[in-house]
Image (tube, rainbow, N blue to C red):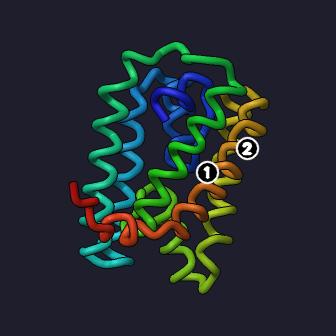
């Protein structure tokens, strides 16, 4: 996100969208905004989803915020054009989320809000996440630049395709192959 998406103000989801708006309006560092949004979500997760889910999410969010904090100063300007950075950033984002989901972890943010809403209202989590992220993506577009709405939709589509692909790849088969004898 720090390298390919944030320099173009492309939101990869709800917490990232809030972070982009906070940076645009108040010059708040991306990592601080993401961690702040997630801190609130983690407190809610303990209450509604259980301690184990909250601790795993805290770990993932802390690693992501630290990486964003370390990389952002080096990538204030986009490395390429929007049409090169968008697919690369979305694909990398999809790989990361795909691996998290594959091994039962959460990326935090609006995923938690969607899970809580689905539990509370008995809505499917995907539907809840769609409504939450759509509202945030539209708000981000209105605050930063309307074009970012289209970019965010493209980012979501690419990332979702990559997430689904990662779910079908079997890493166990790769690890269990014996090394060739010499």
Label whose residue precedes the other's in the sequence (2 or 1):
2
- Whole-percent x, y for residue 31 in the image: 37, 35
Looking at the image, the residue that sits furthest to the left is: 182
What is the C-alpha distance between the residues marked 2 and 1? 8 Å
Q: Position of residue 123 (x, y in %)?
A: 64, 81
Spot occupied by residue 162 in the image (x, y as percentages of width and height): 60, 55
Q: Residue at x 37, y 33 (%)?
A: 68
SS class, disc 1: helix
Is residue 171 toward the left or the right of residue 137 in the image? left
Q: Residue under label 1, please give it.
A: 159
Q: Residue at x 78, y 30 (%)?
A: 147
Q: Is residue 179 above or below residue 116?
A: above
**Counting other residues with Cα less than 10 Å from the Cα at mark 2, is it few (<14), some (14-19), or many (20 or more)?**
some
Q: Is residue 122 visible?
A: yes
Q: Nearer the viewer, residue 69 or 141?
A: 69
Residue found 25% across the figure and 56% down from its top: 59
Q: Quadrant of residue 154?
A: top right
The residue that disc 2 covers is: 154
Q: In which quarter of the view is residue 99 placed? A: bottom left
């Amino acid at each position: 996100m720090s390298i390919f998406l944030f320099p173009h103000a492309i939101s990869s989801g709800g917490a990232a969208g809030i972070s982009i708006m906070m940076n645009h309006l108040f010059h708040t560092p991306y990592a601080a905004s993401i961690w702040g949004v997630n801190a609130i979500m983690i407190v809610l997760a303990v209450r509604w989803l259980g301690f184990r889910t909250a601790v795993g999410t805290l770990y993932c969010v802390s690693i992501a915020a630290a990486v964003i904090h370390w990389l952002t100063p080096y990538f204030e300007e986009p490395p390429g054009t929007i049409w090169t950075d968008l697919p690369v950033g979305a694909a990398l984002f999809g790989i990361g989320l795909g691996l998290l989901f594959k091994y039962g972890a959460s990326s935090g943010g609006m995923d938690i809000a969607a899970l809580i809403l689905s539990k509370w209202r008995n809505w499917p989590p995907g539907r809840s996440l769609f409504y939450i992220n759509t509202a945030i993506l539209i708000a981000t577009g209105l605050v930063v630049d309307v074009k970012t709405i289209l970019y965010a939709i493209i980012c979501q589509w690419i990332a979702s395709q990559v997430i689904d692909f990662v779910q079908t790849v079997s890493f166990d088969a790769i690890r269990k192959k014996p090394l060739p004898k010499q």
